[in-house]
Amino acid sequence: MTNPCIICVAITGSLPTKNDNPAVPISVAEQVESTQEAFEAGASIAHCHVRDDEGKPSSDPERFARLKEGLEKHCPGLIVQLSTGGRSGAGRARGGMLPLSPDMASLSVGSNNFPTRVYENPPDLVEWLASEMRTHNVRPEIEAFDLSHIFAAHRMWKAGELTERPYVQFVMGVKNAMPVDRDVFDFYIKTVKRLFGEDAPWCAAGIGPNQIIVNEWSVSQGGHARTGLEDNIRLDRDTLAPSNAALVKRVVALCDQYQRPVADWKTARALLNLPLKTH
């Protein structure tokens, strides 16, 4: 297998704290430094959240702007993907950073259960977020927590609400949502190829100890892989991950094992039909 593997690093998220793992980057400066290490280790996409001064999730466009500026300065060519996720804000505040025109942004196209709440993505909000992404030339990454979300992305694509063929990421292992199940994973791949074409790119993320399991499934099956401290703070049951870069290196090792080259930023941009630029 020679097709390159794109590694996405989810650097911070909304939930992990330094009490959970001191390596979790909270401030903008910490996030830039952690991402630079992960970029140098092989990541070509950074999935980004921001926190306020108390370390709580935020959708503050000004903080996103500072983070984006820092990443573009210290990681030239890196694909910057900002989160519009629901843990960071409510309603249209979730898309307040889209006028910054990042390379990509996450887009959840349907609702589902989370560990203690409903992750609400009502159709009118999804349509508005997609419209903002079109307006500001932002490539969506479809976060699929359920099979229905893949079909929703297909409907939006056919309706012209998504201008590019969707790049779908399967998210597995969130409590009360889709578990890590190999038969389901294989059916997701089959469904993406049926709806979007045999050569459609896709990615997958596993939560907690399932991260490395889903990483291996993705790499071995020709997909792209997401890792990072947002999803998992440990190397194993007894060892905290010392950095985002350490988690990226685990995926790089899997790529070596399955004889897949790690996509550099130029290759990743070409695979995802993103402009070849260093900002």
Image (cartoon, grey):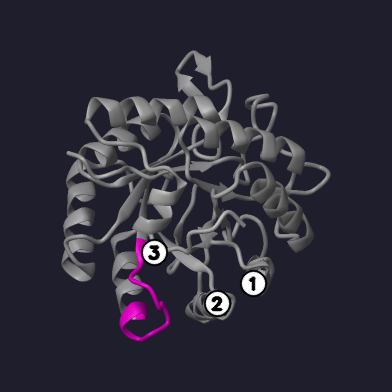
Please tell me which of labels 3 and 1 falls first in the chain: 1
Instruction: Measure the alpha-carbon separation of dots 3 and 2.
Output: 26 Å
**Cβ atoms under marks 3 and 2 closer than 8 Å:** no
Q: In the rendering, at what x and y percent does residue 3 appear?
A: 24, 45
Amino acid carrying mark 2 in the image: Leu
Q: Residue at x 43, y 44 (%)?
A: 175
Q: What element carries label 3?
A: loop
Identify the residue under disc 2: 125
Please tell me which of labels 1 and 2 falls first in the chain: 1
Specify the label residue 91 is tagged with.
1
Q: Does the magenta stretch include residue 210?
A: no
Q: Residue at x 48, y 64 (%)?
A: 275
In the displayed structure, 144 sits above or below 235; it is below
Outermost residue toward the bottom? 159
Identify the residue under disc 3: 273
Report the span colored magenta.
156-167
Mark 3 or mark 1, whichever is nearer to me: 3
Mark 3 or mark 2, whichever is nearer to me: 3
Please identify the quarter of the rendering in which residue 216 is found.
top left
